[in-house]
Image: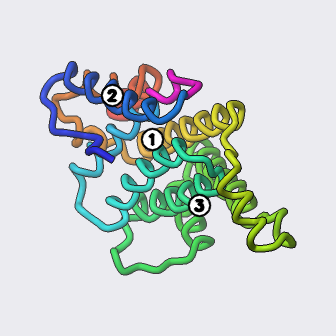
Amino acid sequence: MVELVKKVDHLEEIKEEVVKFLSLLQSTKQFPNTIELQAVVKYIIAMKSIVNNHEDSHYKNSLIFDIISILHSLTGTSVRQYHYIFRSFIENYHRSMLDLEDNDEMGVNQLFRSMKKKYGNTVESQIIIDFIANEYDESCLYVHSNTKAKTTVQMYYVDIINNDDFDEDTLSSTITKTFVILKKMLELLIVSRPDIIENAFYRNKQKLKYLIGERLYTLMLSRIRT
C-alpha cells in the first residue's frame, strides 16, 4: 500500500490524495458505492490527522493501520478476513479513546464497560457506543461461525481459494458498514472530545469540513461553542 496521507497545505492537494487512493483501490476491482467509499477515504484522512496531532501511541497507530487494512481487504475475496480486521479496528478505537498505555492488556469486555463509563454520560453518546458494540458482536459471530468444519482439509482449502465471498451485494453492504462505523466513531469523538479535533485542525476548518462533511462539521462547531 502506498502512503495514504501526505503532508498537505491546501484543500486541492487533499482532494487529489482522495482521488489517487480511490484510483488505487479501483485498479484492483470494480467497486459499488463509490460515494460512500470516497467518504471512507476522507474519514481515514481526518482520523490520521487527529492521531498525528495527538500523543503518539501503539494503539493509535494500530488504529490507522487497521482501517487502511480494512480497505485493502475489500480488494480481496474473504469477508471473514474483513471481519477479523474490523474487530481489531474497533478494539484499537476503544483503546485509543481510553488513552491506554502501550502495554495495557485490558480484555474486550472491560474495554466496552470502560468506554461506556468514560463517555456514556449522554443518551447521544450511549447510543453510539451501543451501536459500535453491536457491530463488534456481529463481526464476532461471522468470524466464529464455520459451516464447513466437517469437510476435509483439502476440500476446505480448495473452497477458500476458489470462492469470492464479495459478490456485488456483499461488497456494497460491507462498504456501507465501513462508512457508517467510521462516521459513528468520529461523531462520538466530536460529542465527547471536540477539543482534540479542533487542535488537530487549528486554522484548517475548511479542510475539516471537506473531510467529515457538512453534518458532522456543524455538530463540531456547536460543540466548540458550547
Residue where numbered disc 3 is placed: 84
Going from N to C along the chain, the mark reached first, 2 or 3, is 2
**Alpha-carbon distance for marks 2 and 1?**
18 Å
Asked whether, in this view, residue 75 is left or right of residue 63, the answer is right
Which of the pair 98/155 is nearer the observer? Answer: 155
Label 2 sits on a secondary structure element that is: helix
* One can see residue 226 in this view: no
Going from N to C along the chain, the mark reached first, 1 or 3, is 3
Where residue 196 sits in the image (x, y, percent)? 29, 46
Q: How many numbered marks does the figure carry? A: 3
Looking at numbered disc 2 in the image, what kind of residue is underneath it?
Answer: Val
Residue depth check, mark 1 versus mark 3: number of the one nearer the observer: 3
- The picture quadrant where one finds residue 58 is bottom left
Q: How is the image coloured?
A: rainbow
Looking at numbered disc 1 in the image, what kind of residue is underneath it?
Answer: Leu
Residue at 37 percent across and 65 percent down: it is 59
In contact (CB < 8 Å): disc 2 and disc 3: no
Residue where numbered disc 2 is placed: 18
- The residues colored magenta run 31-38
Going from N to C along the chain, the mark reached first, 2 or 1, is 2
* One can see residue 113 in this view: yes
Q: Quadrant of the C terminus?
A: top left
Asked whether, in this view, residue 128 is left or right of residue 219, the answer is right
In the rendered structure, find residue 156 and report the number of the disc placed on it. none
Q: Tag 3: Cα neighbours inside 10 Å, few (<14), some, or many (≥20)? A: some
Residue at 21 percent across and 21 percent down: it is 11
Which of the pair 73/183 is nearer the observer? Answer: 73
Looking at numbered disc 3 in the image, what kind of residue is underneath it?
Answer: Tyr
Where residue 67 sits in the image (x, y, percent)? 44, 49
Residue where numbered disc 1 is placed: 186
Residue at 38 percent across and 40 percent down: it is 44
